């Protein structure tokens, strides 16, 4: 046994290895990414790990392996589950042989996501059990429970940590001993083929199993009741830790239920908790899933207990929880006076630090060259964006993202805009990893339906935003092999795109010319801007402002590079941030920016 | 040992790594540790706040407002932004060198470093100011600001560790090729008064 500081995602990964996982698939997405990466880093030779091209593919690959008896783990963020929902819904009916855990990280806040969706709904919708860990140390052992439950009922199991569990660290005791799962192999059987008749029969089976799992969850060591009184508080996931901390300084008697298994709802345990209570406050992030279940139970059994939470506006309906939010709600619930914080004198004005593209990021040059080309041609183009670092191209002064919806939607939204406004130029931006994820069907659709759009592929040779994962275009795999790089250009040509050109965005004049030619082409045209992410290459010579600078600040106003600032009208370049991309030098009207040697 | 320590800085300054070194060193001394971060979407240049909570298994991952025993500010504006977390009796260690965001040059709120330092100084708590740039110059790289700040914190007894304890954490958890550099940085931080 060892005690180590582990991030929640690392604890889950090591817990999965301990539980004998054989196959791990996923697609990067904050806050889930480190789970798969940690398994890859710590795996023995009998564990297979891959970054799949998208979540649907990942889930299907894992399902195939699970049909043989392999223990499999699939990792993704909450919006990834939307992509994987087709196989997930059907797999709930078909079931698995080897334990299969689908890890879906939710992101209350949201901190780094498009939505604040709640995966616990998905569990109920798909009739799948779900675990909701409160801390990294709990998640380490809980993932093993999830595998065991999956095999007991031959069902995929959802495992739903949230950002404050995934990215928090804690002292975790890890065990060296590992369970070895022997893979029996695929046995042919009609049960693996989904048909209406089979689905009907399995629907009945699923319903019966849900009742049994509800009983199992009622005696789960991860759920427990403490305290006493007529007032009760339910804490779910990380919120349970805020409840515990808030109650540490309170003397009012209160009964607390820690609930880690929101579906199937452990009715029996919760009824035990409700006994003797008059009021209950439910503390859960995202949607009122547990709150609604309590209302259902009270309604079913005619219990006159008042249930407070999001539906009664006693808890916020959106955003992540904090100690302050939970402590205030509990004080109100218990009728206590809140201890006020000592008054602070007014702070001096603080500059904001909104998320911006890194200094030296090639996306800045790509956006700027397109902007300049359209300005020169007098086109009032619409710029559709996509998911990745380049969503940050929306910030001033670039202001080059007019729409952003979900993975791959930039290309298809542009098609819709073009149909309604045929005379307007539509330019879609998409990154290399997102192109492979869900960009390709949009390209085929545009070619097939003879749409007139221009697609700019921002190929920085990595999946940058989630921390630089490889993808099919890089040729690197998580098994340490180098496979044949899949050429985006060849894929496009194979999809029937006749106008495909490549350019280096950091050569501003050439890049703008390439864009102009592409936009003038009738039909689907694609420009692939090739320039690697600064995080995976060495910096060039740092740039500096020469004495010939006239102080016009055009460089700052046009591209907003975070390495540049103007103090008292004097422009300076921070040498620690500059990557020497030399974009600013190409904008300066008096050639007053050059390399430091 | 029961300590709540908050580290605030700008993405790229090594704030998160410093928080992990503190937590891991506490674990080596058989204390329970919990940390968490709030990081925006930016890869670099955004606000980064790390919470380190030592000695209480039942605490939540983030320090409540007004409860931090110590704030280590890697940058003056970020120290100030999080000053509400500090206990009335808490201590502050701040690098006075600003990182001016590009928004300040694009017509946003201008960066008034003198006002910020003045405010921090007048909070009435024990404040240690250091010139991070000067100290980094002694190490010939800005990459070790985080370890330098830890050296200062040890010297001023803001964290209950020895140089040896922190160095052991570094040698056990960070790449060996940076060990000598980190050792030098820790010494520069510990002897920061020589560089004033």
Image: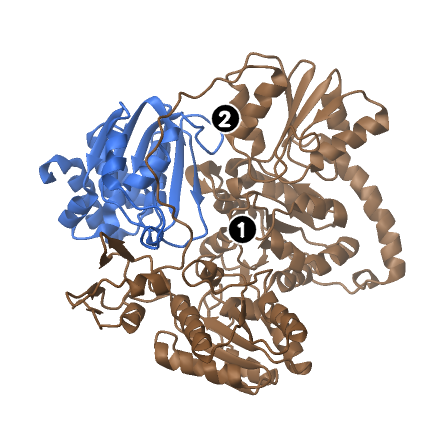
Chain colours: A brown, B blue
Q: Which residue lies furthest to the left in this view?
A: B194
In the rendering, which numbered label is found on residue B58?
Answer: 2
Binning the other alpha carbons within 10 Å of mark 1 as few (below 14), some (14 to 19) or many (20 upward) gives many
Point out residue B27 in the picture as x, y percentages from the top left corner.
Answer: 37, 33
Specify whether B113 is left or right of A16.
left
Point out residue A314 in the picture as x, y percentages from the top left corner.
Answer: 64, 28
| Residue toward you, A469 or A545 | A545
SS label for mark 1? loop
Q: Residue furthest bottom?
A: A498
Q: In which quarter of the image is residue A596?
A: bottom left
Point out residue A285 in the picture as x, y percentages from the top left corner.
Answer: 61, 37
SS label for mark 2? loop
Residue that numbered label 1 is attached to? A32
Residue A362 visible in the snapshot: yes
Q: Quadrant of residue A258?
A: top right
- Count of numbered marks: 2
Point out residue A262 in the picture as x, y percentages from the top left corner.
Answer: 69, 37
| Residue toward you, A166 or B132 | B132
Binning the other alpha carbons within 10 Å of mark 2 as few (below 14), some (14 to 19) or many (20 upward) gives some
Q: Which residue is drawn at 20% across and 43% down?
A: B132
User: The disc numbered 2 marks a residue on which chain?
Assistant: B
């Amino acid at each position: 046994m060892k005690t180590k500081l582990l991030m929640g995602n690392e604890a889950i990964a090591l817990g999965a290895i301990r539980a004998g996982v054989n196959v791990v698939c996923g697609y990067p997405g904050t806050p889930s990414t480190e789970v798969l990466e940690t398994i890859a880093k710590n795996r023995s030779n009998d564990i297979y790990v891959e970054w799949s091209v998208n979540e649907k593919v990942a889930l299907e690959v894992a399902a195939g392996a699970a049909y043989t008896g392999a223990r499999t783990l699939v990792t993704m963020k909450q919006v990834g589950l939307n992509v994987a929902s087709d196989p997930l819904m059907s797999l709930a009916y078909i079931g698995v042989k080897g334990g299969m855990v689908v890890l879906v990280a939710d992101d209350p806040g949201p901190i780094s996501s498009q939505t604040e969706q709640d995966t616990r709904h998905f569990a109920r919708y798909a009739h799948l059990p779900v675990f909701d860990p409160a801390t990294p140390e709990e998640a380490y052992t809980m993932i093993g429970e999830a595998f065991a439950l999956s095999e007991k009922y031959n069902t995929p199991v959802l495992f739903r940590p949230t950002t404050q569990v995934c990215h928090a660290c804690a002292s975790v005791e890890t065990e060296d001993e590992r369970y070895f799962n022997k893979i029996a192999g695929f046995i042919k059987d009609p049960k693996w083929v989904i048909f209406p008749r089979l689905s009907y029969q399995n629907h009945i089976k699923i319903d019966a199993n849900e009742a049994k799992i509800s009983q199992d969850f009622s005696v789960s060591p991860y759920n427990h009741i403490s305290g006493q009184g007529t007032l009760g508080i339910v804490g779910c996931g990380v919120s349970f830790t805020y409840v515990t901390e808030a109650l540490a300084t309170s003397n009012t008697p209160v009964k607390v239920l820690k609930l880690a298994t929101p579906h199937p709802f452990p009715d029996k345990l919760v009824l035990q908790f409700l006994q003797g209570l008059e009021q209950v406050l439910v503390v859960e992030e995202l949607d009122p899933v547990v709150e609604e279940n309590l209302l259902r139970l009270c309604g079913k059994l005619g219990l006159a207990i008042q249930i407070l939470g999001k539906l009664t506006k006693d808890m916020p309906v959106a955003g992540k929880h904090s100690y302050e939010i939970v402590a205030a709600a509990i004080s109100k619930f218990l009728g206590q006076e809140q201890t006020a914080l000592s008054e602070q004198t007014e702070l001096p004005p603080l500059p904001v630090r909104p998320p911006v593209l890194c200094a030296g990021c090639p996306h800045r040059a790509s956006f700027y060259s397109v902007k300049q080309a359209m300005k020169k041609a007098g086109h009032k183009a619409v710029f559709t964006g996509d998911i990745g670092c380049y969503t940050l191209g929306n910030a001033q002064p670039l202001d080059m993202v007019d729409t952003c919806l979900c993975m791959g939607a930039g290309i298809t939204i542009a098609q819709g805009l073009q149909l309604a406004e045929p005379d307007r130029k539509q330019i879609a931006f998409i990154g290399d990893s997102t192109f492979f994820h869900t960009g390709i069907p949009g390209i085929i659709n545009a070619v097939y339906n003879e749409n007139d759009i221009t697609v700019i592929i921002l190929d920085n040779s990595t999946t940058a935003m989630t921390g630089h994962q490889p993808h099919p275009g890089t040729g690197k795999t998580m098994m340490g092999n180098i496979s044949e790089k899949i050429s985006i250009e060849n894929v496009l040509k194979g999809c029937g795109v006749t106008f495909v050109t490549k350019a280096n965005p950091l050569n501003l004049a050439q890049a703008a010319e390439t864009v102009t030619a592409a936009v003038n082409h009738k039909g689907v045209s694609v420009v692939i801007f090739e320039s690697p992410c600064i995080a995976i290459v060495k910096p060039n010579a740092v740039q500096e402002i020469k004495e010939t600078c006239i102080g016009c600040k055009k460089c700052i106003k046009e591209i907003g590079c975070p390495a540049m600032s103007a103090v008292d009208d004097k422009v300076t370049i921070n040498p620690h941030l500059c990557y020497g991309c030399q974009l600013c030098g190409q904008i300066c009207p008096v050639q007053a920016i050059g390399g430091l040697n | 040992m029961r300590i709540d320590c908050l580290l605030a800085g700008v993405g790229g300054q090594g704030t998160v790594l410093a928080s992990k070194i503190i937590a891991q060193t506490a674990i080596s001394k058989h204390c329970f540790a919990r940390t968490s971060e709030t990081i925006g979407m930016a890869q670099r240049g955004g606000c980064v706040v790390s919470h380190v909570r030592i000695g209480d298994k039942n605490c939540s991952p983030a320090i409540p407002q007004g409860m931090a025993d110590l704030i280590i500010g890697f940058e003056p504006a970020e120290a100030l932004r999080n000053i509400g977390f500090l206990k009335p009796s808490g201590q502050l260690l701040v690098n006075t060198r600003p990182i001016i965001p590009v928004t300040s040059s694009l017509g946003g709120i201008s960066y008034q470093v003198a006002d910020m330092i003045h405010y921090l100084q007048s909070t009435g708590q024990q404040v240690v100011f250091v010139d991070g740039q000067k100290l980094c110059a002694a190490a010939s790289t800005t990459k070790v600001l985080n370890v330098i700040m830890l050296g200062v914190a040890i010297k001023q007894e803001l964290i209950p560790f020895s140089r040896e304890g922190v160095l052991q954490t570094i040698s056990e958890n960070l790449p060996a090729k940076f060990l000598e550099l980190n050792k030098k940085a820790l010494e520069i931080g510990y002897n920061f008064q020589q560089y004033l």
